[in-house]
Image: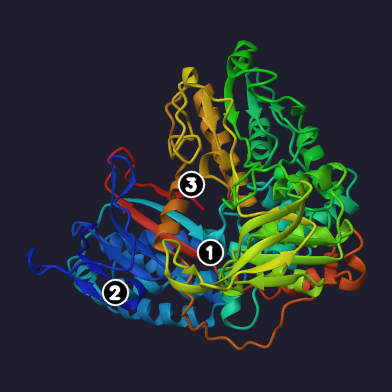
Amino acid sequence: MTEVSFSSWTGEILDNRGKTDTDRVELTGVKVPAEFEPGERVTALMGWNGLIVMDERVSIPDMSRSYMEAIQEASCGKCIPCRVGTRVMREILTRICTAGGEKGDLEKLQRLGADIMVASKCEIGKTGPIPVLHALKHYRKDFEELINQKKSVPRGHYRWHITAPCRAACPASLDVPGYVELIKEHRFEESLDLVRERCPQPGTIGRVCIRPCEFNCRRNLVDDTIQIKFLKRFVADYEWTHSPEPRVPRPTEKKEKVAIIGAGPAGLSAAFYLRLKGFHCTIFEALPEGGGMAAVGIPDYRLPRNALGYEIDTIQRVSTEFRYNVRLGKDLSLEDIEKQGYKAILIAVGAHDNKKMRVEGEDAGYEGFIHGVRFLRDIALGNEIYKGKKIAVVGGGNVAIDCVRSAFRVGFEDVNLLYRRTRKEMPADDVEIEDAEKEGVKFNYLTLPVRILARDNKVVGLECIRMELGEPDASGRRRPVPIEGSEFRMDVDVVIPAIGQDVNLDFIEERHGIQVSKWNTVIVNEDNLATDRPGVFSAGDCVTGPDVLVGAMAAGYDSALAIEQYIRGEEFHLPEYRRMEKIVKQLGVYDPNEHVGIPGGWPKSTMEHLPPESRIHTFEEVERGFTPDAAIRDAERCLRCYRVLMLATDMEEIPADSVEDQG
């Protein structure tokens, strides 16, 4: 627990100044960073919710000055209250801190801050003055001393960062308000350029992302969320349909080579950003095509192959080499790759194996028993699908939903999903569940299979039992408990378990010196994603276990940063903006109970969908995408919820007159 001297965060005052150890009160509900990086202690912070002071030696007037400099830097300058008002506040604070303070300055600062918060159009102006106003109220004597005694104060050491609730929720920390605003201004190509700074597959993510950004959108507290995912897809599709070739920078060429194992989102992301840094990348992929689970695990009605293929071609366009149908451990080994002169290796294999249901008969080899990942892969690769009329899919995640929706499209007439909890506990995306309901999928909640029934080695049914919800388990969800005597039979031709996925790491042997966890994931250094074997890194599902696509993509970006430093022979140092992003996530930016204080009534844009009665017979994409007018209209609803965070630190090596822009 970090000791706190003073806090006004979220408006709740904690004041330990002058108190003995026994009288001090601990700060709760906020995760205060103890260090910015090893050896650099965080002594105070200022941000959208107030200020927190850990070290009483910090000069609050000086930090207020530096904070307003950061606000000025972050301001878009499109409205006078923020552009001019924050500049005047900065000038007054600078005057106070350089022995030029005047009587009445503090009152001017208070009036200006209050006026700026009311009159500004976006959240830089509406939240920027908050910590300074808190400082003026609770540290007034410090300001008065500088003014009355005409004292100056030396600059401290500060680091600042710009974030937003949506941006902080994104695993890739995409600048959501930035690219949304560019859409509003009809600058579609520039919007896509900004997205590609962290996301090399915007069209893919814009179709299948689980949208953590949208669940942290403040607009949702007023009427409807900004449709961030679809806006990302819009700018990607706009380039696809309007530009002769993708807008990607040309990399500078370096001699060093990097080998990447796996052409899923983590591997593709790492290859893209390593190539932009100039390294030659070769991706070794066991499948006959790139994309990983996005290619063979997400059906075309959600992610068309040509859309995914366009983005893989874009990555190839920056001279990434792909070697398909090459399986590590079978066709070549880690040693083979190292002998080919690669300076670093990234293991980025996905979770392509299935978890077992642990029910009687699942290992008997019955015809008609098909694992969900295999079912979707066979559809994607054009393999023959086991025929039948009635199918039961077991599970509650997105893979299970993909299986039931695909089942109609390959000829099944009676499609059932079995889930042992209720709709409320299902981890699948609500939008996907609703689409499955519209398409006629039958949902059997509080139902658990206990035995697979077969005749002549073919599946003919399932023996199931009804469940009820008991006390919450470790996941926080209520534990399903069997109801004695409620067993029943369901006649089906095909059973598909889709209850989870596992990573296959059989290619890693003890002699390789790479640690594997008891969950069959690669153990890496949390910061640089390095394994215990020199030059070998790992990222994506093989490190975290099955996770969201955007999370694997973000890990690929981070691995590129680490691999570049390794090849250069540098000691790894996590970039400052990435450290700040992690601190922001700890603090938490989104407040679901906030009263935003603006009128609602501006609903989100609508999108054309294929009608359910026709789409269940085709793998044609269901969601048709935004028109330019719809995209612009939805982008105009954005509240531009930027926030600025500043840390005071005690690292002596930082120049005393620096205020670093980490935005």
Q: Earlier in the sequence, mark 3 or mark 1?
A: 1
- Which disc number belongs to residue 136? 2
Label 2 crowding class (10 Å Cα cut-off): few <14, some 14-19, many 20+?
A: many
Side of 442 relative to 137 (left or right)? right
Side of 44 relative to 407 (left or right)? left
Amino acid marked by disc 2: Leu
Side of 399 relative to 645 (left or right)? right
Secondary structure found at label 2: helix
CA gap, disc 3 and disc 1: 15 Å
Where residue 319 sits, quadrant-wise, is top right
Secondary structure found at label 1: loop
Q: Is residue 572 visible?
A: yes
Amino acid marked by disc 3: Arg
Label 1 crowding class (10 Å Cα cut-off): few <14, some 14-19, many 20+?
A: many
CA gap, disc 2 and disc 3: 31 Å
Q: Which residue is mark 1?
A: 164
Q: Earlier in the sequence, mark 2 or mark 3?
A: 2
Secondary structure found at label 3: helix
Q: Position of residue 241 (x, y in %)?
A: 90, 53
Q: Which residue is mark 3?
A: 578
Q: Is residue 179 visible?
A: no
Residues at circles 3 and 1 in contact by the CB criterion of under 8 Å: no
Q: Nearer the viewer, residue 504 or 358?
A: 358
Q: Nearer the viewer, residue 18 or 395?
A: 395
- Judge depth for marks 2 and 3 and give the one in front: 3
Question: Colour mode?
Answer: rainbow
Residues at circles 2 and 1 in contact by the CB criterion of under 8 Å: no
Identity of the residue furthest to the top in this view: 339
Q: Position of residue 110 (x, y in %)?
A: 36, 79
Residue at the spot 65% in from the left edge and 12% down from the top edge: 340
Q: Does residue 625 lie above or below 196 as drawn?
A: below
